[in-house]
Amino acid sequence: MAISPVGYQANSYPATNTTAGGGPQNGNASGSGAAAPSASGDANDTQTQQEIQKLKQRQQHVITHEMAHESVGGQYASAPTYTYTKGPDGKSYINGGEVSIDVSKAKTPEETVIKMRQVRASALAPSDPSPQDESVAQKASQIEAQAQQQIAQQQTGSNATANSTGTHSNVTPSRTKTASPSDNTVKFQQLQSIYSANMETVGHISIYA
Protein backbone atom coordinates (compact mmCIF):
# COMPACT_ATOMS: atom_id res chain seq x y z
CA MET A 1 0.00 0.00 0.00
CA ALA A 2 1.59 3.23 -1.12
CA ILE A 3 1.19 6.25 1.06
CA SER A 4 1.84 9.67 -0.42
CA PRO A 5 1.61 13.15 1.05
CA VAL A 6 -1.41 15.29 0.36
CA GLY A 7 -1.37 16.06 -3.33
CA TYR A 8 -0.29 19.50 -4.43
CA GLN A 9 -1.61 20.81 -7.70
CA ALA A 10 0.76 23.32 -9.20
CA ASN A 11 -0.60 26.18 -11.24
CA SER A 12 -0.15 26.09 -14.98
CA TYR A 13 1.99 28.93 -16.19
CA PRO A 14 1.19 30.51 -19.58
CA ALA A 15 3.95 32.20 -21.50
CA THR A 16 4.54 35.69 -20.15
CA ASN A 17 5.32 38.51 -22.52
CA THR A 18 8.12 40.48 -20.90
CA THR A 19 8.84 42.66 -23.91
CA ALA A 20 8.81 46.34 -22.96
CA GLY A 21 8.24 49.37 -25.12
CA GLY A 22 5.57 47.92 -27.43
CA GLY A 23 2.64 50.09 -28.45
CA PRO A 24 -0.73 49.45 -26.76
CA GLN A 25 -3.20 47.44 -28.80
CA ASN A 26 -5.96 49.99 -28.39
CA GLY A 27 -3.81 52.98 -29.20
CA ASN A 28 -2.40 55.76 -27.01
CA ALA A 29 -4.85 58.51 -26.10
CA SER A 30 -2.04 61.01 -25.52
CA GLY A 31 -0.38 60.24 -28.79
CA SER A 32 2.92 59.45 -27.07
CA GLY A 33 5.02 56.66 -28.56
CA ALA A 34 6.22 55.37 -25.13
CA ALA A 35 4.09 52.80 -23.33
CA ALA A 36 3.14 53.52 -19.73
CA PRO A 37 4.31 51.04 -17.07
CA SER A 38 1.90 48.14 -16.85
CA ALA A 39 0.26 47.68 -13.47
CA SER A 40 -0.91 44.25 -14.55
CA GLY A 41 2.70 43.34 -15.39
CA ASP A 42 3.84 44.26 -11.90
CA ALA A 43 0.98 42.27 -10.44
CA ASN A 44 1.97 39.24 -12.51
CA ASP A 45 5.56 39.51 -11.31
CA THR A 46 4.41 39.64 -7.70
CA GLN A 47 2.10 36.68 -8.20
CA THR A 48 4.91 34.70 -9.83
CA GLN A 49 7.28 35.35 -6.93
CA GLN A 50 4.60 34.34 -4.45
CA GLU A 51 4.00 31.10 -6.32
CA ILE A 52 7.72 30.32 -6.39
CA GLN A 53 7.92 30.95 -2.66
CA LYS A 54 5.01 28.55 -2.08
CA LEU A 55 6.76 25.89 -4.16
CA LYS A 56 9.95 26.29 -2.15
CA GLN A 57 8.04 26.01 1.12
CA ARG A 58 6.22 22.93 -0.13
CA GLN A 59 9.52 21.36 -1.19
CA GLN A 60 11.10 21.91 2.22
CA HIS A 61 8.01 20.55 3.97
CA VAL A 62 8.02 17.33 1.91
CA ILE A 63 11.75 16.75 2.42
CA THR A 64 11.45 17.25 6.18
CA HIS A 65 8.43 14.94 6.33
CA GLU A 66 10.09 12.09 4.43
CA MET A 67 13.42 12.40 6.22
CA ALA A 68 11.60 12.01 9.54
CA HIS A 69 10.12 8.71 8.36
CA GLU A 70 13.48 7.47 7.08
CA SER A 71 15.59 8.45 10.06
CA VAL A 72 13.31 6.76 12.61
CA GLY A 73 12.58 3.73 10.41
CA GLY A 74 16.25 2.82 10.24
CA GLN A 75 16.94 -0.57 8.67
CA TYR A 76 13.24 -1.09 7.96
CA ALA A 77 12.86 2.08 5.87
CA SER A 78 13.93 2.93 2.33
CA ALA A 79 15.38 6.18 1.09
CA PRO A 80 12.73 8.74 0.11
CA THR A 81 11.54 9.01 -3.47
CA TYR A 82 10.12 12.29 -4.72
CA THR A 83 7.81 13.69 -7.37
CA TYR A 84 8.38 17.07 -8.99
CA THR A 85 6.48 19.94 -10.55
CA LYS A 86 7.74 22.78 -12.74
CA GLY A 87 7.43 26.32 -11.43
CA PRO A 88 6.81 29.54 -13.34
CA ASP A 89 10.56 30.10 -13.41
CA GLY A 90 11.10 26.86 -15.33
CA LYS A 91 12.74 25.10 -12.38
CA SER A 92 11.59 21.80 -10.89
CA TYR A 93 10.41 21.67 -7.29
CA ILE A 94 9.62 18.67 -5.09
CA ASN A 95 5.88 18.46 -4.44
CA GLY A 96 5.46 14.92 -3.09
CA GLY A 97 7.30 11.86 -1.86
CA GLU A 98 7.18 8.57 -0.05
CA VAL A 99 9.27 6.17 2.02
CA SER A 100 8.84 2.40 2.02
CA ILE A 101 8.90 0.55 5.32
CA ASP A 102 8.89 -3.17 6.08
CA VAL A 103 5.95 -4.24 8.26
CA SER A 104 6.42 -7.98 7.98
CA LYS A 105 6.66 -9.99 11.19
CA ALA A 106 10.09 -10.77 12.61
CA LYS A 107 11.39 -14.27 13.40
CA THR A 108 9.99 -14.34 16.94
CA PRO A 109 7.06 -12.62 18.67
CA GLU A 110 9.51 -10.77 20.93
CA GLU A 111 11.42 -9.39 17.94
CA THR A 112 8.14 -8.55 16.21
CA VAL A 113 7.07 -6.41 19.18
CA ILE A 114 10.30 -4.43 19.00
CA LYS A 115 10.11 -4.06 15.22
CA MET A 116 6.49 -2.90 15.19
CA ARG A 117 7.23 -0.27 17.83
CA GLN A 118 9.92 1.12 15.56
CA VAL A 119 7.61 0.98 12.53
CA ARG A 120 4.90 2.85 14.45
CA ALA A 121 7.41 5.46 15.60
CA SER A 122 8.56 5.90 12.00
CA ALA A 123 5.02 6.37 10.70
CA LEU A 124 4.28 9.02 13.32
CA ALA A 125 7.71 10.69 13.19
CA PRO A 126 6.70 13.80 11.16
CA SER A 127 5.13 16.66 13.08
CA ASP A 128 2.06 16.38 10.85
CA PRO A 129 1.46 12.68 10.11
CA SER A 130 -1.03 12.13 7.31
CA PRO A 131 -4.07 9.83 7.52
CA GLN A 132 -2.01 7.24 5.63
CA ASP A 133 0.79 7.53 8.17
CA GLU A 134 -1.67 7.00 10.99
CA SER A 135 -3.06 3.97 9.17
CA VAL A 136 0.40 2.40 9.02
CA ALA A 137 0.92 3.14 12.71
CA GLN A 138 -2.39 1.45 13.50
CA LYS A 139 -1.40 -1.61 11.47
CA ALA A 140 1.89 -1.84 13.37
CA SER A 141 0.01 -1.64 16.66
CA GLN A 142 -2.25 -4.50 15.60
CA ILE A 143 0.70 -6.71 14.66
CA GLU A 144 2.41 -5.85 17.94
CA ALA A 145 -0.73 -6.79 19.90
CA GLN A 146 -0.85 -10.15 18.14
CA ALA A 147 2.79 -10.79 19.00
CA GLN A 148 2.17 -9.83 22.64
CA GLN A 149 -0.67 -12.33 22.72
CA GLN A 150 1.62 -15.04 21.36
CA ILE A 151 4.17 -14.27 24.06
CA ALA A 152 1.51 -14.54 26.74
CA GLN A 153 0.30 -17.87 25.34
CA GLN A 154 3.83 -19.24 25.28
CA GLN A 155 4.38 -18.25 28.88
CA THR A 156 1.04 -19.77 29.93
CA GLY A 157 1.86 -22.99 28.11
CA SER A 158 5.30 -23.12 29.68
CA ASN A 159 3.85 -22.65 33.17
CA ALA A 160 1.17 -25.29 32.55
CA THR A 161 3.78 -27.79 31.41
CA ALA A 162 5.91 -27.11 34.46
CA ASN A 163 2.92 -27.53 36.79
CA SER A 164 1.85 -30.76 35.09
CA THR A 165 5.33 -32.21 35.39
CA GLY A 166 5.52 -31.33 39.05
CA THR A 167 2.09 -32.83 39.81
CA HIS A 168 2.50 -36.23 38.13
CA SER A 169 6.13 -36.92 38.83
CA ASN A 170 6.98 -39.37 41.61
CA VAL A 171 10.31 -37.68 42.03
CA THR A 172 10.49 -34.83 44.47
CA PRO A 173 11.09 -31.76 42.33
CA SER A 174 14.16 -29.71 43.03
CA ARG A 175 13.71 -26.26 44.47
CA THR A 176 13.44 -23.62 41.79
CA LYS A 177 13.42 -19.86 41.86
CA THR A 178 9.77 -18.99 41.41
CA ALA A 179 10.58 -15.34 40.72
CA SER A 180 12.91 -16.16 37.84
CA PRO A 181 11.44 -14.99 34.48
CA SER A 182 11.08 -17.40 31.59
CA ASP A 183 13.62 -17.48 28.79
CA ASN A 184 11.16 -15.65 26.53
CA THR A 185 10.72 -12.86 29.06
CA VAL A 186 14.48 -12.46 29.49
CA LYS A 187 14.98 -12.32 25.73
CA PHE A 188 12.16 -9.80 25.40
CA GLN A 189 13.74 -7.56 28.01
CA GLN A 190 17.10 -7.79 26.24
CA LEU A 191 15.51 -6.80 22.93
CA GLN A 192 13.78 -3.87 24.61
CA SER A 193 17.14 -2.71 25.90
CA ILE A 194 18.65 -2.96 22.41
CA TYR A 195 15.68 -1.04 20.95
CA SER A 196 16.01 1.76 23.48
CA ALA A 197 19.75 2.05 22.85
CA ASN A 198 19.22 2.45 19.08
CA MET A 199 16.28 4.84 19.07
CA GLU A 200 18.44 7.69 17.80
CA THR A 201 19.84 5.67 14.92
CA VAL A 202 16.68 4.02 14.00
CA GLY A 203 11.34 5.96 7.77
CA HIS A 204 5.39 9.13 3.58
CA ILE A 205 5.18 5.35 3.97
CA SER A 206 4.44 2.55 1.59
CA ILE A 207 4.27 -0.97 2.96
CA TYR A 208 5.97 -4.05 1.63
CA ALA A 209 6.03 -7.50 3.18
Image (tube, helix red, strand yellow):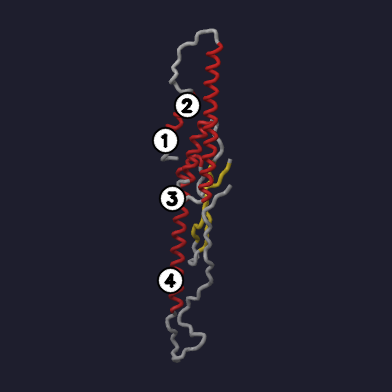
Q: Are marks 3 and 1 in contact (CB under 8 Å)?
A: no
Residue at x 53%, y 45% (from the top left corner):
136
N-terminal-most mark, 1 or 4: 4
Q: CA distance from mark 2 to mark 4?
A: 64 Å
Secondary structure at numbered mark 3: loop
Mark 3 lies on residue: 127
Say which quarter of the image contains residue 175: top left
Give the residue type at disc 1.
Answer: Ser
Q: Residues within 10 Å of mark 3 (few under 14, many from 20)?
A: few
Instruction: Identify the residue under disc 4.
Output: 46
Camera-side mark, 2 or 4: 2
Q: Is residue 4 left or right of residue 42?
A: right
| Image position, residue 115 (x, y; %) | 50, 37
Q: Is residue 162 above or below residue 71?
A: above
Q: CA distance from mark 1 to mark 4?
A: 50 Å
Q: Which residue occupies 55% across, 47% down?
A: 206
Q: Residue at x 49, y 23 (%)?
A: 183
Query: Which sits earlier in the primary sequence, circle 2 or circle 4?
Result: 4
Residue 203 visible within the image: no
Whole-percent x, y for residue 185 in the image: 47, 26
The mark closer to the camera, 1 or 4, is 1
Can you identify the residue that label 2 sits on? 185
Which amino acid, by three-letter code, is at mark 2? Thr
Tell me the SS state at disc 1: helix
Asked if the residue under mark 4 is in contact with the one under mark 3, i.e. CB atoms within 8 Å, the reply is no
Give yes or no for contact between labels 1 and 4 (Cβ–Cβ under 8 Å): no
**Mark 3 and mark 2 residues within 8 Å of each other at the beta carbon:** no
**Residue behind mark 1:** 196
